[in-house]
Amino acid sequence: MTGPNTTNAELFEAARRVIPGGVNSPVRAFGSVGGTPYFVARAEGPYVFDVEGRRYLDFVQSYGAIIAGHAHPAITDAVAKAAADGTSYGAPTEREVALAERIANAAPGVEQVRLVSSGTEATMTAVRLARGFTGRPQIVKFAGCYHGHADALLAAGGSGVATLGLSGSAGVPPSAVADTIVAPYNVVPELDDQVAAVVVEPVAANMGLIPPAPGFLAGLRQACTEAGALLIFDEVITGFRLGPGGAAERFGVTPDISCFGKVIGGGLPIGALGARAEIMETLAPAGPVYQAGTLSGNPLATAAGLAALDLLTPIAYGELVARAGQFADGLRGVLTTAGFDAVVTQVGTLVGLYCGPAAEAGWAPADYDDARTTDEQAYARLHAELLRRGAAFAPGAYEAIFVSLAHTPEIIDEALSAIAAASTAATAS
């Protein structure tokens, strides 16, 4: 099937014979941007290299799982050393205790942590835990927030669900979402005594990048407290990316349950949820809410995660914020110069891009309805022109843009030059 002269097109054709749609996560198929997906052969720092030998400045960074740059030696060395001792045990390890301690010491309101294998597992378990702790059935989520592909949380999801134009998914019966209430983002909903929890991305990063409106998160905290419901922050993207305390620390609002993923695994599959001990001890084996996982606390993932967190010093976070700012400001400038209508958003280390004219000066999307007006065709043109010039954004208009520690100021300037040319070509096409 493969060889030294394998092309992306040949691999995609082979993949479609044995993998549904040719990919293992839908947005990777390039369905919304057109063309053939590039198959990555290797990656280093800010770059990925495809099987045809092309190099791309990468602003996908595994959708935020990579924060130090690809193949950082401290992380690859930690993984190699861990692998030499075995790749999975199905038994407790010292490193999973160390990683849980790191999370609990950094995240507001977290006293105990349960490690799982993905962000989806983390949010799915958080919902079950909230229902078990409160004895209530209903969950409130927000349109455009993506919390993984668990049945109850797919309603009005963002990310790949938005890219595919789906409000949920076939195969999810009405009964699975009967107790899921969908509210507009940035609006505090009314809660009653049937609501177990409100789950939210404290910074919405799966419908582009939309910050919380002033008072929104504090309003959610107050509403949950008054109704006896739990507040769940999905910090799978923002956790340890906006800072060691994530969005909770940045906005000064402490949730009851926090969910993590991506950064805490250093690029390997991982997820986690944490809360005060009173809540967490409702989980088995301490309590009646069941959750389990053969690969939970995997020794390679915990080694990679600890190595990644060691790199995230206060100086490193300062550099990330500065580089995200340099990139966001430069992106606005080159798009404006090219006449490419767009709005660029930034929250700390995160950058977002909305394609289309601003409704008025200073306007930016505030909710899912706003985000869905993004010009997906314009984004597809820009994406194609970027790839031709060796720069890679996510193959979907609803993903955040990720800058890593490997994106030096010089690399960002190089990327902006490519984006300037790409946006000019996309505007003319």
Image (cartoon, rainbow, N blue to C red):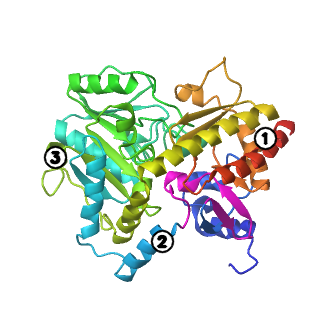
The residue under label 1 is 423
Q: CA distance from mark 1 to mark 3?
A: 51 Å
Q: Is residue 149 left or right of residue 21?
A: left
Q: Residue at x 32, y 53 (%)?
A: 272
- Asked if the residue at tag 2 contacts the one at tag 1, i.e. Cβ–Cβ closer than 8 Å, the answer is no
Location of mark 2 (residue): 76
Q: Please state the horizontal and vertical placement of residue 78, each as a whole percent of the image.
A: 41, 72
State the CA–CA distance, disc 1 to disc 2.
Answer: 36 Å
Q: Give the class, few, some or many, for how many residues have Cα within 10 Å of label 1's Cα (few <14, many ≥20).
A: many
Which amino acid, mark 2?
Thr
Magenta residue check for 70: yes
Which element is circle 2 on?
helix
Q: Give 423 or 2, whichever is nearer the viewer.
A: 423
First reached walking from the N terminus: tag 1 or tag 3: 3
Name the residue at the top extreme: 360
Examine the rendering and report whether any part of residue 398 can be seen: no
